[in-house]
Amino acid sequence: MKALVYNKKALPGKLTFCEIEKPIPNENEVLIKVQAVSLNAADYRSLRMGLIPKKKIFGADIAGRVESVGKNILKFKPGDEVIGDLADYGFGGLAEYALAPEKALIFKPVDLSFEDASALPMAAVTALQALRNKGCIQKGHQVLIIGSGGGVGTFAVQLAKFFGATVTAICSSDNIGLSQSLGADHVIDYTKENFLKNGKSYDLIVAVNGNYPLSACKRILNPKGIYVMVGGGFPQIFKSLLFGWLMSFGAKKIRSLAAKSNVEDLEFIVSLVNDKKIRPVIDKCFSLDKSAEAMKYLSEGHAKGKVVITVQ
């Protein structure tokens, strides 16, 4: 099969598109013929940090058809269309075939395209867990989404609206129209207005991007407000992890999310997409042989929504 494989000697990005041996499922695995895979910050950040998957193949969010199954697999059979998040199982999605345990997969609805399906797992589940699990979102909350134009941010805006919140989106001027189309009640161009000093306050802040002082973000929280750090610059992540607990003494809380793949959460997301409550936003699609180019494009931080690789 063909795959995008890590090779530390490959220039310029240590990734090479090549032919490798097709994997064979063991008795507890499913072999999937990958149709589409979406990229996440976890892919390029792991590459930068030297955190290389054992199989040397990145790509967690896959959608495809079951090719074959191990003898202990009961839920799936060849031909079934599935969606999965392989982040906890060694990645391996940027290839024509990928292995996954049964517990990592759910059935793909017939009417959902493989490209749209692959855009859902990590980004949408991360947004859901940030808002619901860490942020304790409630109907009527004033919610601020910092970084509303990327993969997680586009889902966060839509999910916050689904939960009945009033949403303020922070993004660049290029993403104002997109954030409005996703339902944001207010959109602030961070290049033209300092949202930390406009006198507005919020019940929940979800920081997907940017590098803003935690103390300043805490000041614009309402009493009992919650700040959830999902991503952003490394200094922001480091400070949140190191000082968040210390800054959470009192009514206002500073929390960090390490999202976990969860099939129940993914099924919930898919049901919302099926019911037209939310939708994936796909910026660009690349072919599998252009995956290294796609990874570079995503890492530059200008993608509107998701970047997807079409494999078949």
Image (cartoon, rainbow, N blue to C red):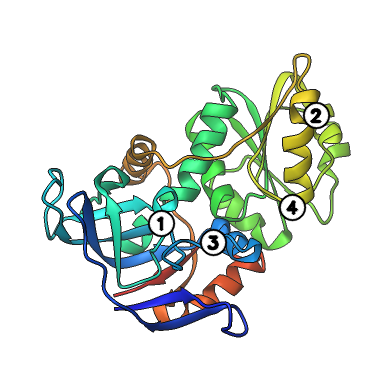
Q: Position of 242 compared to 77: left or right? A: right
Q: Residue at x 44, y 76 (%)?
A: 4
Dot 3 or dot 1, earlier in sequence: 3
In the picture, the quarter occupied by the C terminus is bottom left
Whole-angstrom CA distance, mark 2 to mark 1, is 33 Å
Name which residue type carries label 2: Lys
Dot 3 or dot 2, earlier in sequence: 3
Q: Nearer the viewer, mark 3 or mark 1?
A: 3
Q: Nearer the viewer, mark 2 or mark 1?
A: 1
Asked whether 203 or 164 is in front, the reply is 203
Asked whether 215 or 205 is in front, the reply is 215
Q: Residue at x 56, y 84 (%)?
A: 10
Q: Considering the numbered disc 1 on the image, is that residue within a helix, a strand or a loop?
A: strand
Residue of label 4: 233
Dot 2 or dot 4, earlier in sequence: 2
Q: Is residue 9 above or below residue 168?
A: below
* Place of residue 130 in the rendered image (x, y in percent of width and height, measured from the top left): 56, 35
Which image quarter: residue 214? top right
Dot 4 or dot 3, earlier in sequence: 3
Whole-angstrom CA distance, mark 3 to mark 1, is 10 Å
Q: Are marks 3 and 2 in contact (CB under 8 Å)?
A: no
Residue of label 2: 218
Q: Are marks 2 and 1 in contact (CB under 8 Å)?
A: no
Whole-angstrom CA distance, mark 1 to mark 4, is 23 Å
For label 2, count other residues whose C-alpha is less than 10 Å away and answer few (under 14), some (14-19) or many (20+). many
Name which residue type carries label 3: Asp
Which image quarter: residue 261? top left
Dot 1 or dot 4, earlier in sequence: 1
Whole-angstrom CA distance, mark 3 to mark 2, is 30 Å
For label 4, count other residues whose C-alpha is less than 10 Å away and answer few (under 14), some (14-19) or many (20+). few
